[in-house]
Amino acid sequence: MESIAAWQGATLCGIVAWIVMASHLNVTRKLRSFFQPWVARHVINGTPLLLQIQKYEHRFLDALFSGLSCVVSVPFYTAFLPLLFWSGHGRLARQMTLLMAFCDYLGNCVKDVVSAPRPSSPPVRRITATKDEEDNAMEYGLPSSHTLNTVCLSGYLLHYLLSYPQYEDPSIKCFGLALVCLVVGLIGLGRIYLGMHSLVDVIAGLTIGLMILAFWLTVHEYVDFFIVSGPNVTSFSAALGLLLLFAYPTPELPTPSFEYHAAFNGVAFGIVAGIQQTYHQFHHEGVPRIFTSQLSIPTFVGRMLLGIPTILIVKFCSKALAKRILPVVSNTLGIPIKSTSYIPNLNGNGKKSDEVKQSGYIQKLFFFNRTAFDVDTGIRFLQYAGLAWSVVDLVPSLFSHVSL
């Protein structure tokens, strides 16, 4: 018990030390000055390859690759993971949620540290079929988040399925590996075809994804054991989530990447806090699973019809409460705040301020140079934390009450 508390403290102190050191030594700028010219040169040199691939332009390929991009996007996973929890596969769901948060944080950190451009459009034809893709196009290029996330999540899903005795046959393992490679290859090719990434972005996403997957397969059992039965789980997760917000690097120019991380950071905290409280009631290995007599398809549909509206209501209420509470708490503590979108009255003329939206490192922690804290970050974190908590705590309680 004491050793666990010791490594928790060491982890938090290490992050604080990194924040201080990175701020004083300008680590982000030095790394950017080293990597950015090299990556930008490869993006430019890779343009002829993109144009060659886009010569095969066809409406079917446009629809295929746009659809695949939506299926492996963060919003899709955010919508899919609650269903995985409610289907009875709690261990897989919580592992994929935390892995997704880990991938999102590291991938976006690399994006904003390097701040490398995407392929220039024109001459490259960029296809953004959805609002999510339009937002993605506002981020920096390297690495390809879609490729990175697909490698990690499909790889972990394959590992999870092959851990069952009925899938030990070598032919099944070969088929699963081939299927994962096919999906990853199509996603990488699709990102190039759509004009969203260059070849160097996709290779970087593949490489970083394999490294993250190898690391996660080494530690996932320890992480899961800590979440379901460790001490100080909720308080440690809250402190870790807060420090990771401050440790996020400052990009060359503001992008939506930090907003995405703040949201999924909140999701991870909400899941961990909820699981810690309700594991033995709703998320242990003996819960009913879909496609069994204990959890039939009609029952699962009933869960979706009850659960989805509930988590949306909780998300709305969490945002409304955070918008009211956080400004009051900040003013009470004497913390200077501004809002770039959620509370126009806190931003003078009500317009967005890119300067405030992404302040860097230690300035965000100690408010040096009179930099006001963007309260939207806290609102977004609590909003998605509330949503995630409802997925694993409130909604399963409702299922129990109505016999679903």
Image (cartoon, rainbow, N blue to C red):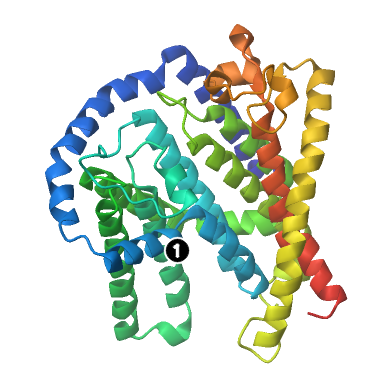
Q: Residue 66 lies in what quarter of the image? A: bottom left
Q: In this view of the protein, can residue 352 be seen by the observer?
A: yes
Question: In the image, is residue 83 above or below residue 8?
Answer: below
Look at 30% across and 38% down and name the residue there. 118
Question: In the image, is residue 267 above or below residue 176?
Answer: above
Which image quadrant: the C terminus? Answer: bottom right
Choose between 218 and 151: the one closer to the eye: 151
Q: Residue furthest right?
A: 401
Look at 71% across and 88% down and name the residue there. 294
Q: In this view of the protein, can residue 295 be seen by the observer?
A: no
Q: Secondary structure at mark 1?
A: helix
Look at 35% across and 30% down and name the residue there. 115
Number of other residues with Cα within 10 Å of mark 1, as a class: few under 14, some 14 to 19, many 20 or more = some
Choose between 211 and 301: the one closer to the eye: 301
Q: Is residue 340 left or right of residue 17?
A: right
Question: In the image, is residue 267 above or below residue 365?
Answer: below
